[in-house]
Amino acid sequence: MAAAGLGLRRAAVLASGPGLLRAGVWGRLLPLAAGPRRHAAHFTFQPDAELSAHGQTQKMNLFQSITSALDNTLSRDPTAVIFGEDVAFGGVFRCTVGLRDKYGKDRVFNTPLCEQGIVGFGIGVAVAGATAIAEIQFADYIFPAFDQIVNEAAKYRYRSGDLFNCGSLTIRAPWGCVGHGALYHSQSPEAFFAHCPGIKVVIPRSPLQAKGLLLSCIEDKNPCIFFEPKILYRAAVEQVPVEPYYIPLSEAEVLQEGSDVTLVAWGTQVHVIREVATMAQEKLGVSCEVIDLKTILPWDTEAVCKSVVKTGRLLISHEAPLTGGFASEISSTVQEECFLNLEAPISRVCGYDTPFPHIFEPFYIPDKWKCYDALRKMINY
């Protein structure tokens, strides 16, 4: 009861509006000193141009574009099923809201709180010939399912000589920092799976990209992990086609052409490096080529190397810790393929080699100032 009382008082404080009240020691409401609010977002979302070639569009944020993709799949594929913790109620981020009511409890249903079981069940559904779309509630909680993904899903086709496969399995998971997620709700574990042949790993940057890439993952003949930047669920809004459309996997996209430095990122970090490119042009007169990798495994080596041959410099940025992060793989490949073209050492601007902090998140994330500083050092090398 005491805990419930504290929760109610906290809710009352939050409901009263920012900057107006604070809780005293015993829940009494006291005035807050006026002052500037700190905004947690370390980026400015930059929407893509509208896709008119795919028919009618609708204003959607990222979670709504995910819902739209799942709706399209369930309506067109009678074997498709969606399952995970709380998905029948719409999911903690509302990505499956309304789908159980529309398609029934046999096609959109909850599972026990057991990630290993969720993925293991998905493998069985896929092997039986159906389309399995599993949700792991947070990417941070995917590790209990690591054995099922790495030793079962990724190897099923290979070990059976292609007699059997679970290629119709797609695993969705909210991913990345969110401003207040701390240790267990902010991780970016893509590099763990990049070491595993047999699966594909995809991370979109926007609602428009998310729907097209998710539909491509669902249609792909290999098991896919689809990480969704949860900070963009509501922060990112675009005009998204209502009907299905597909964006190719393993094809990086050059968002801005340049001649002096290549900037590579994926997910939320793409918007950070786009700001960095603008800063570099305005402050230094430096022309940056901006690349969204989109697919982590298998990644588009050709697009990145082609850009580095032109610019001679490469900066890679991601939220995950520096050591063993996927930037290391990109850096190693570019060093091998483009060594004689490099004008400066490759730069990696990433999270620190610590657990993801709570109140220190603004200092942990690789924001535009850290990226800009690294770029400036490269230019002056």
Image (tube, rainbow, N blue to C red):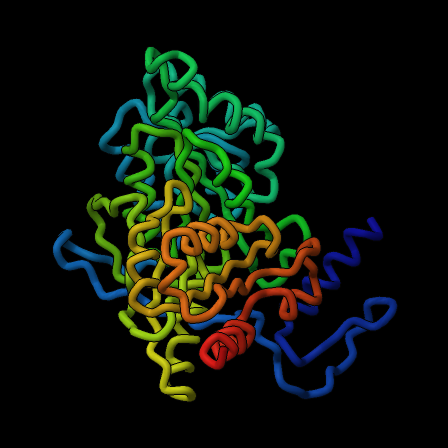
Q: Position of residue 92 (x, y in %)?
A: 53, 46
Location of residue 110 with respect to 48 vertically, above or below: above
Residue extending farthest to the front is 340
Q: Position of residue 118 (x, y in %)?
A: 53, 27
Write the residue at 30% across / 22% down.
Answer: 79
Location of residue 71 with respect to 357 vertically, above or below: above
Q: Position of residue 197 (x, y in %)?
A: 44, 31
Write the residue at 39% across / 12% down.
Answer: 160
Regarding residue 381, the answer to whether it shows in the image is yes
> Left or right of 375: which side holds 291?
left
> Left or right of 52: which side holds 370?
right
Front position in the image: 191 or 5: 191
Location of residue 323 with respect to 82 vertically, above or below: below
- Location of residue 349 (image quadrant): bottom right
- Location of residue 379 (image quadrant): bottom left
Front position in the image: 276 or 88: 276
Q: Position of residue 58 (x, y in %)?
A: 24, 58
> Left or right of 342: which side holds 118?
right
Front position in the image: 317 or 17: 317
